[in-house]
Amino acid sequence: MSLLTILELTPLIGAVLLYAVPKQNAQLIKQVAFGLSLVTLAVSALIAFRFKTNNSGMQFVESHSWISNFGIRYAVGIDGLALVLILLTTILTPIVFLAGWKEADNGRWSVRTFYLLMLVLESSMIAVFAATDVFLFYVIFEAMLIPVYLLIGGYGRGERAQAAMKFLLYSLFGGLLMLASLIGIYIISTNQIGGTFDLAKLATLQIDSGTENFLFLGFFIAFAIKAPLWPFHTWLPGAAKSATPATSVLLLGVLDKVGTYGMIRFCITLFPHATKTFTPLIIVLAIISILYGAFLAIGQRDINGLIAFTSISHFGFIVLGIFAMTSQGISGASLYMVNHGFSTAALFLVAGWMVARRNSSQIEDFGGLQRITPVMSWCFFIAGMSALALPGISSFVSEFLVLVGTFTRYPVAAIFGTTGIVLAALYVLITVQRSLHGPTTPGNENLTDLNLREKIAIAPVIAILVLMGFFPKPVLNWINPSSHQTMQAAGYSDPLPKAGK
């Protein structure tokens, strides 16, 4: 059994162990779940330590027959992109456990069920990034919907049932489209190389252009819904407003990255010709997402709605970098996935504490917090600066790479994308001004600042945002080989500099 399989199983084993803890002992359940998430983090750190940065192929590979009649295997392996997203998952999970210590206390179901679902979700997210058998990926892709649906519907607030159902229906629709394409590509593989779902073998198939286009769309729409990319985004604002902060962090910080990860790993690898065909359209959708998300964020009065619409804009940047088809663009988009995960985590966690203290999610109710809760306000400010890609904070590096990589091939798209930076400054600075500065809003006078547990939870996120702003090289060393491998699989090379006149 490889370390990768051990990593996948650790949270699942933890979920089973929670049943040995008395249901009434909520404090012990939380402690056990937190400890198990730290064990998972330690295993992922060991994998990262043993990972070879000069290797663009899959590492920690393991493969066993699963459903032999259809060539389906339990096959896992990771490259640099999968590694950084797995690390994002295992780092954020114990942080949200610690930060959201009291989130499950008033849910529809027990505290134990909440942490059981969280551990199952963590295991699923690790497995989906590690799967190299396309059918295995699909099964996990669909299975992840169950814990998220239950977490939103069982522990959320407001119109949680409606938000959970909308999330489920959108995701199931995308999954059905992917399944149709999956069946199609399996039939083609049966005729050419014998039935298989192995990603590397499927990439060698010869598919006529019309069929390839339809198969590509089945995968792409499923991933665009998950990402979410405009116009497939409408499930997100309701889910972000209704879910608990811990659920929102894992949903927008990690789970949505499955969409953009899938675009790189499956759309480009399996359908290179269709990728070239649809790239202009996808770039237009990415630009619309950037601008649409930013404009709607400016007008938001609900702080969770604001974070949701900023994420739509940021995912537009990620998709833009992916389909720019340059090494800088794909590396920037891959790094953006990680940076956005930590940036969104900081925003949702601090916003959750603000909402819990004020019993309101309206931005106008948080006026003057800088004088009353300085530590919480500074954490929110730094997270906001990351969202607008301030130089020196992590998101700047990835956004810069995306725009530079895009400009070399699609300069007009890069110019429109740059407009999103200006709009980001507006929605972040306006929110900071309304919530942190100005006169103290009545009702805020006695709000308490972050306690020790909350400070410990947010400290590593803030540290990562700053550290990766100044020193992203270790993460880029993991990402760059897989970015070059993706471009090579798609038949692209970086544009040559134009000779001076």
Image (cartoon, grey):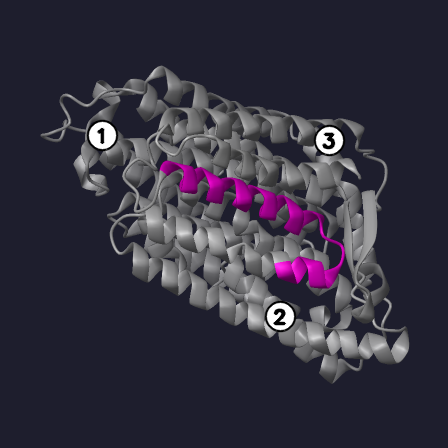
User: In the depicted view, which residue is nearer to us: 225 or 102?
Assistant: 102
**Which residue is tagged 2?**
178
Badge count? 3
Q: Position of residue 379 (x, y in %)?
A: 38, 26
Q: Is residue 240 in the magenta section? A: no
Q: For the view shown, which residue lies furthest in the left direction? A: 442
428 lies above or below 354: below
**Mark with earlier residue (2, 3):** 3
Neighbor class of circle 2 (other Cα within 10 Å; few <14, some 14-19, many 20+) is: many
Neighbor class of circle 3 (other Cα within 10 Å; few <14, some 14-19, many 20+) is: some
Q: Quadrant of the N terminus?
A: top right
Q: Is residue 343 visible?
A: yes
Going by the numbered disc 1, the residue's amino acid type is: Arg
Describe the element under mark 3 as helix, strand or loop: helix
User: In the depicted view, which residue is nearer to us: 59 or 494?
Assistant: 59
Going by the numbered disc 3, the residue's amino acid type is: Ala
Q: Which mark is residue 48?
A: 3
Image-quadrant location for residue 143: bottom right
Label 3 vs label 1: CA separation? 38 Å
Q: Which mark is residue 357?
A: 1
Going by the numbered disc 2, the residue's amino acid type is: Met
Q: What's drawn in magenta, residue-wise?
A: 111-139
Neighbor class of circle 1 (other Cα within 10 Å; few <14, some 14-19, many 20+) is: some
Q: Residue at x 53, y 25 (%)?
A: 35
Q: Are marks 1 and 2 in contact (CB under 8 Å)?
A: no
**Mark with earlier residue (3, 1):** 3
Q: Is residue 438 left or right of residue 206?
A: left
Q: Is residue 124 in the magenta section? A: yes
**Mark with earlier residue (1, 2):** 2
Label 1 vs label 2: CA separation? 43 Å
